[in-house]
Image (cartoon, helix red, strand yellow):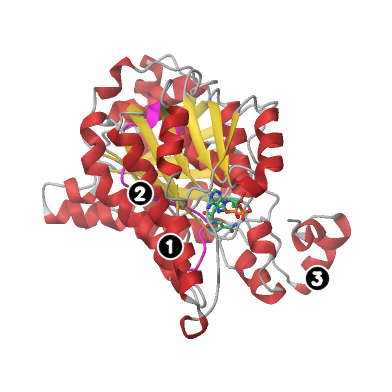
Amino acid sequence: MNDSYLNFVNSPFGARVARSLGLPKPEVLRRYRADQPEFGGLMAIGAGREPQLLDALANLVTGIGVTSVAHESAGLWVPLANRHGLMTGRFEAAESGSQGKLAALLFDASGIEDSTQLEPLHGFFHDTLRSLGRCGRIIVLGRPPESCATPRQWTAQRALEGFTRSLGKEARRGITANLVYVEQGAEGRAEATLRFFLSPRSAYVSGQAVRVAAAGAGLEATSTFDWHQPLAGRRAVVTGAARGIGASIASVLAAEGAHVIGIDIPTAREALDATMRQLNGTALAFDIAAPEAPAQIAAALDEQGVDIVVHNAGITKDKTIAKMTEAAWQSVIDINLSAQERIDDALLAAGILRDGGRIVGVSSISGIAGNLGQTNYATSKAGVIGRVQSMAPQLRARGITINAVAPGFIETQMTAKIPLAIREAGRRMNSLSQGGQPVDVAQTIAWLAHPGSAGVSGQVVRVCGQSLIGA
Ligand SMILES: NC(=O)c1ccc[n+]([C@@H]2O[C@H](COP(=O)([O-])OP(=O)(O)OC[C@H]3O[C@@H](n4cnc5c(N)ncnc54)[C@H](O)[C@@H]3O)[C@@H](O)[C@H]2O)c1
């Protein structure tokens, strides 16, 4: 759907009107385009005491080929960068006024062990934030609090979450701020995640705290991939692929090299066929909630197996509980939740989902916050989160990850049905003051499906522009 307000305030006349009336001016977000460089510009590096992730950052900077500047808090960076043969310089305090100079700010807080050591966060971002350009990226790196050795360290690492989320709310201008907790031993597994959060692919993901775990490290040793076509040779099933977010997921996974098998209901067959034809994919017209569907899907995939399963199909049947029929309750739970369980069980039991595979469920911020008129929908979407959290430890031994994305307001036919006033509120009540696009959800799923995301499992990543709902 078209966001006419965003288009208006970004026109020369609209910008003048917005300025004179003091209206909010959402930024036109920079999104990934295959014909434009994904990374570029200057990246400023800061650090707290005894940073432990600078080597991982040096590998990242080498991989994406950008130039870095070291803030005074990261004295160790310059000799390290020199050792890696990287182009680097020092961030000068005088640059703090020069808006737009930097593309990203990265801060290594992994060595902070006590709340009294948090000040360098203030120092670094105080000096650099005004130099960050529009649609810039902020990443704070830490250690997962629950893996910390002492209560003081846990406390200080947990504090990073409030800091990063607040930065996301302050920064504006299409800037995102996210926190990546890298477990000890997982330093070599963080690159795909750091690339995602630095890239325009994460345009609508802000205020998130993501963990990269060491558990099962080594299982992916046999998995080689090319950063430009990371899913080449992999097969991906996407449910609800005929339109909206599902069609976009199918298209992004195909662009990354996957062969996509799209599933949708028989009445959507024409649209599904058209989408899959464009992607050289395979169309399967099944109602995923039909009792025979899991066996039919398993049979259709059996010969070659599958590496990625994306449970995207979902419906709403909104009514307050007193007015909701049993059928409306049941169909939403069945399609949005129980069908996912039955399909996964069938694919896992028969070994059709291969070891090292990826499962991604589409939840919703309604499943986190609850929503008036959506007891059925929010129940199903909270269930998706429970499923991911409960299954992740069970699947670890096979190197299979399972995660959920929780979209906020995304411009699709589903949200076009919402009455205008509520729709407008849903669009603006987030740090980026706009709705997301289906591709924002799709790109987040592609990162979770990436062979380099083996350390990311059991997590829920919101794609909501840091919505106030359920925050
Ligand atoms: N649009 C949003 O703002 C938003 C927000 C949060 C979560 N979501 C979730 O994202 C997912 C996709 O949403 P969308 O906005 O693209 O919706 P949509 O209605 O545009 O597309 C959903 C697709 O799922 C298919 N589908 C429905 N029931 C099915 C069944 N029984 N078997 C097979 N396919 C079936 C539909 O035919 C359709 O093609 C859903 O799970 C939805 O709950 C959307």
First along the sequence among labels 3 and 2 = 3
Locate residue 393: give its quadrant: top left
Observer able to see residue 148? yes
- Looking at the image, is 263 positioned above or below residue 334? above
Is the residue under label 1 in contact with that under label 3 (CB below 8 Å)?
Answer: no
**Residue 227: percent from left, percent from top:** 50, 21
Residue drawn at 50 percent across, 46 percent down: 128
Residue drawn at 71 percent across, 35 percent down: 274
Where does label 2 land, which residue? 341
Locate residue 31: give its quadrant: top right
- Looking at the image, is 429 positioned above or below residue 393? below
Residue drawn at 44 percent across, 66 percent down: 330
Is the residue under label 1 in contact with that under label 2 (CB below 8 Å)?
Answer: no
Which mark is nearer the camera, 3 or 2? 2
Work out how far the residue at label 2 is from the one at label 1, CA to CA, in angstroms: 11 Å
Q: Which mark is residue 125?
A: none
Work out how far the residue at label 3 is from the one at label 2, CA to CA, in angstroms: 53 Å
Q: Which residues are magenta?
A: 448-471
Query: The C terminus lies in which quarter of the figure?
Result: bottom left
Observer able to see residue 98? no
Indicate the amino acid at tag 3: Ser
**Residue 239: percent from left, percent from top:** 52, 43
Task: Give the SS element for disc 3.
Answer: helix
Where does label 1 land, which residue? 333
Indicate the amino acid at tag 2: Glu
- Looking at the image, is 224 positioned above or below residue 151? above
Work out how far the residue at label 3 is from the one at label 1, CA to CA, in angstroms: 48 Å
Q: Is residue 468 magenta?
A: yes
Question: In this view, which residue lies farthest toward the right?
Answer: 13
Where does label 3 land, which residue? 20
Residue drawn at 39 percent across, 15 percent down: 224
How crowded is the residue under tag 2: few (<14 C-alpha within 10 Å), some, or many (20+)? Answer: some
